[in-house]
Amino acid sequence: MTDPSTVPSIKFYNGYSMPMFGLGTYLGNEEELEQAIKDAIDAGYRHIDTAFFYGNEKAAGRGIRAKIEDGTIKREDIFVTTKLWNNFHKEERVVPACRKSVENLGLDYVDLYLMHWPFAYQDGDDLTPTDETGKLILADIDYLETWRGMEECQRLGLTKSIGISNFNSEQITRLLSVAKIKPVNNQIEVNLNLPQKRLIEFCKKHDITVTGFSPLARPGNRSGVKIDLGNEKVLGLAKKYNKTPQQIALRFVFQCGAAVIPKSVTKSRIVQNIQIFDFELTAEEMSDLDSKATGERVSPMKQTEGAKYYPFSIPF
Ligand SMILES: NC(=O)c1ccc[n+]([C@@H]2O[C@H](COP(=O)([O-])OP(=O)(O)OC[C@H]3O[C@@H](n4cnc5c(N)ncnc54)[C@H](OP(=O)(O)O)[C@@H]3O)[C@@H](O)[C@H]2O)c1
């Protein structure tokens, strides 16, 4: 059990705070996820990351509410993030989608509502609409329109804060030029292959915090991308700090300036993953690890590459 008060938090420009460590939930199925959330809260986690697209908000909510009901936490002790999926990007679809997520979770509000991607899919209930050839059907909806709906979610109190995910620096600049409520957070892939130095620096300059997803590069992912945890540098650091290679990888993400949200439904890993706040990699060790970054992405979203708002066609 990690004392939650030893896990650093970051303050948003709007005054709310987010713990720099949380539990990811992508690909966690219903039963295992509910238990994993209870295990995580018992292990000291105070931040849960889910999304409508993951199809497990209800289970996540059951886990969170069980720990509120048994007195382990109060609602205000836990930071809950969920996300707007790509087929709800029309302005009038955003508030109902957010309401549905809050309802799925069985909570009165979420702490952070993120626009999951800057591009949109065909409107409707199919989360991955495809044509007869199997090609994804995109929609030409500007994320600036979607953002107006996101702002309304915050005004209505469905969420305390709003943010973005997978936005590049140009998209952020364009959003900031019109936003009435600025995003507090950009959730992007950050791991040993992809330290995201320039984008994190850019976000910081604009008062936008960063959360790093796939911090372990999701072992076994479909892209076949792996972080190298078996090299001498990582193994040497693991030995030096008496940590596992995975803990070194997670600490690296934290020291890159991002909140870390590894997913696990395995109790021993849940307990171990959060134990990264009792050591610090030196600047030299950080740049050593950095020099090995391959730039590969676990989530390149190749099937959306032609989309107008595809985020990965520019350096950052
Ligand atoms: N915004 C976005 O577009 C976006 C995209 C991707 C992910 N995310 C969020 O970020 C979270 C984390 O990313 P991710 O799930 O893609 O990848 P990840 O956290 O890098 O990796 C998760 C995988 O690593 C395994 N694992 C966890 N701890 C381990 C350890 N100590 N040793 C060995 N294996 C371990 C897990 O297995 P077990 O569960 O079997 O233990 C799971 O298969 C997601 O769950 C989701 O909440 C957001």
Image (tube, helix red, strand yellow):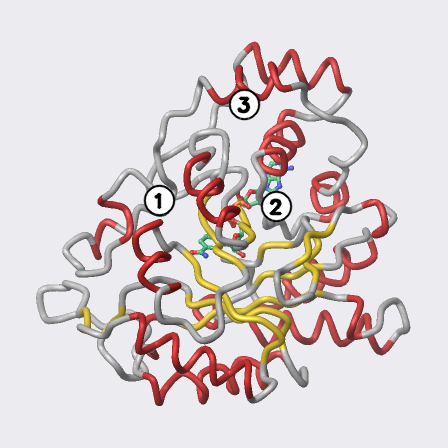
Q: Quadrant of the C terminus?
A: top left
Residue at left 42%, top 36%?
A: 198
Q: CA distance from mark 2 to mark 1?
A: 21 Å
Instruction: Please give left or right for residue 222 compared with residue 228 in the image.
Output: left
* Label 3 neighbour load within 10 Å: few <14, some 14-19, many 20+: some
Q: Amino acid at mark 2?
A: Val
Q: Is mark 3 within 8 Å of ligand 1?
A: no
For the residue labelled by badge 1, is the local secondary structure a helix, a strand or a loop? loop
Q: Earlier in the sequence, mark 2 or mark 1?
A: 1
- Tell me which corner region of the image, top left, top right, bottom left or bottom right, holds residue 92: bottom left
Residue at left 36%, top 47%?
A: 299
Query: For the residues carrying marks 2 and 1, which lies nearer the camera in this image?
Result: 2
How far across and how far down the image is residue 3, in percent?
A: 87, 48
* Label 2 neighbour load within 10 Å: few <14, some 14-19, many 20+: many
Q: CA distance from mark 1 to mark 3?
A: 19 Å
Per the image, the residue denoted by label 3 is 229
Q: Amino acid at mark 1?
A: Arg
Query: For the residues carrying marks 2 and 3, which lies nearer the camera in this image?
Result: 2
Q: Is mark 2 within 8 Å of ligand 1?
A: no
Discs 2, 1 touching: Cβ within 8 Å = no
Per the image, the residue denoted by label 2 is 260
> Vertical placement of 133 versus 84: above or below?
above
Q: CA distance from mark 2 to mark 3?
A: 17 Å
- Tell me which corner region of the image, top left, top right, bottom left or bottom right, holds residue 164: bottom left
> Vertical placement of 169 versus 165: above or below?
above
How far across and how far down the image is residue 124, in percent?
A: 28, 84
How far across and how far down the image is residue 39, in percent?
A: 77, 57
Per the image, the residue denoted by label 1 is 222
Q: Amino acid at mark 3?
A: Leu
Which residue is at the far right? 71
